Amino acid sequence: MQRPPLAAVAALSAAALGYELLLLRLFAIIQWHHFAYLAISVALLGIGAAGTFVTLARRRLLAAYPGSFTLAAAAFAVAAVACFAAAERVPFNALEIAWNPAQFLGLGAIYVLLMIPFFCAATALCIAYSGFGAHIPQLYGADILGAGIGSLGLLAALFFLHPADALRAICALGFAAAGLAAWPAAKGRAAVLALAAIAGPWLLPAPAVELLASEYKDLSQALRVKGARIVAQRTSPLGVVTVVDSPLAPLRHAPGLSLNAAGGPPAQLGLFVDGQAAGAVTRFDGNTMPLAYLRDTTSALPYRLLHRPHVLVLGAGAGIDVLQARAHGARQVDAVELDSRIVTLVQQDLAEFSGRPYSAPGVQLHVAEARGFLAASRDSFDLIQVDLLDSFGSSAAGLGSLNESHLYTVEALESYLQRLAPGGLLAFTRWVALPPRDSLRLFATAIVALERRGVTDPGRSLAMIRSWNTTTLLVSNGVFSAADVAAVVDFCRQHSFDTVHVPGIVAGEANVFNLLQRDDFFAGTQALLGRGRKDFVERYKFDLTPATDDRPYFFHFFKWRTLPELLDLRTRGGAPPLDWGYPVLVMALAQAVVVSLLLIVLPLALSATRHAFAAAPAKLRRRVPGYFFALGLGFMAVEIPLLQRFTLFLSHPLYAAAIVLSAFLVFAGLGARFSARLGPSARWPFAAVAATAGAYALLLPALLAAAMGLAQEWKVLLTLLLVAPLAFCLGMPFPLGLAAVAARAAPLVPWAWGINGFASVVATLLATLLAIHWGYTVVLLLATALYAVAAAQFPDEPGP
């Protein structure tokens, strides 16, 4: 072994990280996002397990090089497709896990299957690190640079390829890495692998990469109706958008429609994103008469209080809120929609059916993210309307509990209110959940946003009503007059809606039409407006603390004190009234910690490797676990919060993922290459990381908020300028430490590498949990402490 396989390492790392990101997309389509997230996190244990395996079999694997690297890379290519195909066929229902413990067996099987491809790829990489200890900075640089290219390449590929076909590309890249490794010693074998890369994945039959969505997802249920069929579909990194026609059992989508309504909606087509309901495309031919039903929904309330308003619709989707605004005579409508594929479907693919609502007179379409659009806009609006952005089923099941959302934070509401004209209204419509959760949290968030703007009596600026399945909250940039209150009460009376809150409301005026045995809506809003707000939030069974940009988990409501009730309902066969996403995340963290500790200790317990460990200096053996575990925790504790910060700043999740993740990995790779020039006593990279991360924790939110209004190209440039120096320094400690271990105790290299991999898994889960409770600022500050620990544990100190 003379030359390190840099090209093969880069290609394999690109394939492995591309596969990790692709699995998030694939499992979001066939299952639900938070179980996909956990499955990927636990599957990454394969990286750490590979370190343990190479530690135990180091001599044989190095003796068989490059064949061992080639075999492991080729095994990754095969397993990437085969293991996913097997995993999606495992009997598992994410919704049933709440009351059926047997579902954990299915989830465990998915964990094991997804672990195999990562184990194969990591085994190959670990062989390279073990065999080329003198070239660790170059190897780590190629590893990280390849990962950056892989993440960016996958995101680009998903604009053109269906996720199932992107899986073929990952397989091809794995075979290419195997071929590159085999080329110097076995050109014939390399040629076969090259042919496998070029032709093999594309010759796979369609069923081998077919996406089998859960039968419990909305799209699967819709397609079970006789005559239902898919009429249009588009894909991108944001997801797969599907449109369904059901002529024999016509779709009727009208959230919050009064039970007194004289008629329903015209013909509609179902709209689904990643298999979950996302609204409907409504037939429109320019005649607003068939849209009369939109006057009978709770979301029509603001039009009773405003005359010919200038309307801003955030999350316009298929255009139903635009049609509602036109039906009420709005003089101008600005519609903001993030997903260009939905716009293309509505405006082009289904133009004859939809009537192209975004091309109507007085309507201006903006393909943008809501917060970014508002930061750049200088217009003022009479009404800002936030659409129902999730399906009723997803909301009721708590499937968004681990999702970040910057639409419903205190800072978001402040930005909306800043763009309202005097007396303008901010309107939110949410699904009814019992006991109430998101409606009350949104009400509490509005109170805090108003108080931050200097409003001393927020109750005079708030109004809320509810129907049998939706609530609508109005926040005024002013106060509601007596005439406004009378109009709200009259609107509710006409449509048999219940008044939850208006200024001056008393108990007898609430809970009149859609009767609840216990009206927690009225009681909750009154408590949130009273002096006992803090005590009420503390005592309530769900977490109603307003979300912030630092803690953007609006849909996380779990409280541990509610767990006994949840378990009791499960034993009685009832569906729990809260999400299971958070408890499962905690369970996954516990599993990851236990498995990590076992696999870290395993090499020390086996006689086959005990002698090699005993030969290493005792101080080195003690420092290796602490150093590499602290690095794994610290790296992710920096990367995850910054990715979240820049997702908001760049106003688009794809831009953030592509730019931030790639910049992190590319500049870290450059830092790794640079570390080869540093002496073994260099400690300034640790101080640089700790100082920069600490400064970013305290100063970055204000800096990015001030720069939100910049043009997109300047925001991208600023992002690169901020990420580059920190990432460059982050790339140095790992190769420095690994090179030090290789120089003093080469058998410990794969063990150290595996420890770092285990720590990355734990950190991914732990950072999310910490952010939910204390925010990303705390996570970043924790990272500074971890790098200080790593500096103190550097494995090159003299002594016994």
Image: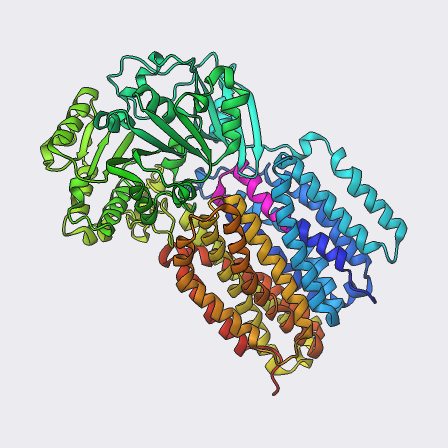
Q: Tell me the quadrant of the picture where the N terminus can be found.
A: bottom right
Relative to 248, does residue 339 appear above or below in the rendering? below
Q: Is residue 430 magenta?
A: no
Horizontal and vertical percent position of residue 3: 81, 65
Chain part drawn in magenta: 17-35
- How many numbered badges does the structure rendering display? 0
Identify the residue shown where x is 16% and y is 23%.
Answer: 493
Q: Position of residue 163 (x, y in %)?
A: 62, 37
Give the answer, above or below, for where 175 lies relative to 214. Answer: below
> What is the residue that sits farthest to the bottom in this orientation?
799
Q: Tell me if 234 is positioned left or right of 279 in this view.
A: right
Q: Is residue 99 visible?
A: no
- Pick out the residue farthest to the front: 378
- Say whether residue 355 is visible: yes
- In the image, is residue 213 above or below residue 155? above
Compare residues 713 and 642 and report the one nearer the observer. 713
- Residue at left offset 43%, top offset 53%: 707
